[in-house]
Image (cartoon, rainbow, N blue to C red):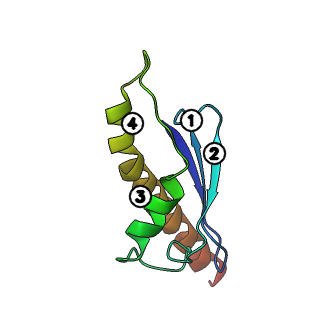
């Protein structure tokens, strides 16, 4: 599994996923629940689940389908939290 998160203040969260479908997937949060200025809330879990709907992990020599399905939301949430922390740090620096 590989993924990347792009958070910008006031813009929808975007995530790119690889090794979970025949081609890479770009997904955009249309709910606003994952926007960078927000805390993780109860609305974030279904928003993330919606973003993961396009993935279709398979089993191969690098990993099993069940493992990939289980790790996708875990790694996506961690990546979102890291991106949010970086966004907050850059916002704090620009206000000094």
- Observer-side mark, 3 or 1, equals 1
Q: Position of residue 11 (x, y in %)?
A: 67, 75
Say which element carries label 4.
helix
Q: Residues within 10 Å of mark 3 (few under 14, many from 20)?
A: some
Q: Position of residue 84 (x, y in %)?
A: 51, 67
- Observer-side mark, 4 or 1, equals 1
Residue plotted at (36% across, 26% down): 64
Say which element carries label 3.
helix
Residue behind mark 4: 68
Residue plotted at (39% across, 52% down): 73
Residue behind mark 1: 21
- Contact between labelled residues 2 and 1, with CB atoms less than 8 Å apart: yes
Residue behind mark 2: 25
- Observer-side mark, 2 or 3, equals 2
Residue behind mark 3: 77
Residue plotted at (54% across, 32% down): 19
Q: Residues within 10 Å of mark 1 (few under 14, many from 20)?
A: some
Quadrant in the rendering for residue 18: top right
- Contact between labelled residues 1 and 4, with CB atoms less than 8 Å apart: no
- How far apart in space, not on screen, are marks 3 and 1 (Cα)? 19 Å
Of the residues under marks 3 and 1, which one precedes in the sequence? 1
Q: Position of residue 27 (x, y in %)?
A: 62, 56
- How far apart in space, not on screen, are marks 1 and 2 (Cα)? 7 Å
């Amino acid at each position: 599994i590989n993924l990347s998160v792009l958070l910008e203040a006031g813009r929808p969260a975007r995530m790119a996923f690889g090794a979970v479908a025949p081609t890479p997937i770009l997904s955009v949060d249309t709910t606003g629940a994952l926007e960078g200025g927000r805390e993780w809330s109860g609305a974030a879990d279904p928003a993330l689940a919606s973003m993961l709907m396009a993935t279709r992990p398979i089993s191969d020599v690098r990993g099993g389908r069940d493992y990939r399905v289980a790790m996708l939301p875990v790694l996506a949430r961690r990546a979102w939290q890291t991106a949010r922390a970086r966004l907050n740090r850059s916002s704090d620096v620009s206000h000094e």
